[in-house]
Image (cartoon, grey):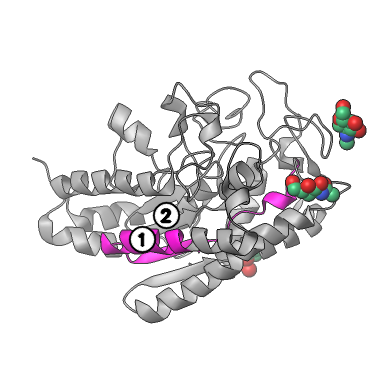
Amino acid sequence: MFKVSYLWILMMAASPSLSLEANGDATKYTAMYVFGDSLTDAGNNKYFIDTLAKADHLPYGIDFSGGPTGRFSNGKNVVDFIGEMVGLPLLPSYADVVAKGESILFGVNYASAAAGILRDTGYRFGHVIPFEEQINNLRKTLGQLRGQLHGNEVSKYLANALVFVDLGANDYLNNYLQAQYYPSSHIYNLEQFADLLITLYRNHILEIQGLGLRKFLIVEASPIGCCPITIHNMKCNATISHMVNMFNTRLKSVVHDLRSNYPGSAFTYVPTSQLFQSLFDNAEAYGFKVKDKACCGGSAGSNGTKPMCFKNTVPCRNRNEYLFWDGAHPTEAGNRIVAALFHNTTSF
Ligand SMILES: *[C@@H]1O[C@H](CO)[C@@H](O)[C@H](O)[C@H]1NC(C)=O
Ligand SMILES: *[C@@H]1O[C@H](CO)[C@@H](O)[C@H](O)[C@H]1NC(C)=O
Ligand SMILES: *[C@@H]1O[C@H](CO)[C@@H](O)[C@H](O)[C@H]1NC(C)=O
């Protein structure tokens, strides 16, 4: 079997043709593994026949070369930009690796729209891939990788790979907040629910760490109180933001705790809610003329706003001037700024 050397991968990662932003980070990471939801899904849900949570149709992907991929954006998503910043090429989704045999050498994206930390989060949409299963898919990738790299290179390769984790928002949006469909809010109060999520989350991070990964970018649960489906009169929904913050506060202490207990690993915390609030408040300065309405899918606070943009809806023309693409996901222009803010704040 053809085995690729780790050095070769480093050279490839450093090659200027793959590095779209010459910012000196190009050789930092060998690969990136992404765990997340619709903000980062790059096509994992699109193969599920029985799921509604998929963006495999136009106008999704209208500004992406090659058209719709399953990304919940008109173009690129936030991890696409983060990959660019660290000199990695666009990552394949895990499903595309399985279906089309795409290369795993620069990493794989396991994110699944509507998924969360809990197994039953998002189940009403049909088939989604919860965090636990996303990690099982990582295990399969690592098995495959061991067949492609020399044995002694695998651990070094993994230790220099970046792990991106952005989960938790759907455990509220597509679970706790939907009391008519999910039992969680009848069983747990908000503190108990946040504790439950965080215990599982911490265990899952340690599972990934136990597989040999060492560099983590831990992203706060996304600000679901601050998107077109929840914005009202130009204001984010404080009730929802408060719920998500209960999770995020705990997440921050988990990251502190992991740092002191696992000194051989690096855990970077990304304070998304704070970054996003400042982006929302200063949207005009970033070039966004519209921040409360979706480019595709209706206006803010009205009954017409949907989290998703329906097949063949005609989207707004000036997509770079909208912060949001649909009711719950930023435009490519929005994602580019969010990624830059992540990078500027944490220099991961
Ligand atoms: C905020 O969200 C909560 C929970 O979904 C909802 O009950 C409430 O009406 C919302 N508030 C506003 C001002 O839209
Ligand atoms: C949403 O629809 C309900 C029932 O049709 C109506 O009473 C309410 O005023 C609508 N709200 C908005 C913000 O349009
Ligand atoms: C990130 O930092 C760079 C360099 O200081 C700056 O030019 C850029 O505007 C910043 N990006 C954002 C989105 O604030």
Quarter of image, res 214: bottom left
Residue drawn 48% across the image and 77% down it: 256
Magenta stretch holds residue 203: yes
Judge from the rendering whether residue 101 lies leftward or rightward of residue 293; answer left or right. Answer: left
With respect to residue 141, does 283 lie above or below?
Answer: below
Is there any visible trace of residue 120 in the rendered image? yes
Quarter of image, res 250: bottom right
Quadrant of the image where one finds ligand 2? top right
Magenta stretch holds residue 115: no
Residue matched to label 1: 29
Judge from the rendering whether residue 287 lies leftward or rightward of residue 347; answer left or right. Answer: right
Q: Where does the image place residue 334, in percent across and percent down from the top left? A: 67, 47
Q: Are marks 1 and 2 in contact (CB under 8 Å)?
A: yes
Residue drawn 50% across the image and 55% down it: 21
Quarter of image, res 10: bottom left
Magenta-colored span: 199-228
Residue drawn 61% across the image and 64% down it: 191
Q: Where does the image place residue 242, in percent across and percent down from the top left? A: 71, 61
With respect to residue 127, does 273 lie above or below?
Answer: below
Residue matched to label 2: 87
Residue drawn 31% across the image and 27% down it: 99
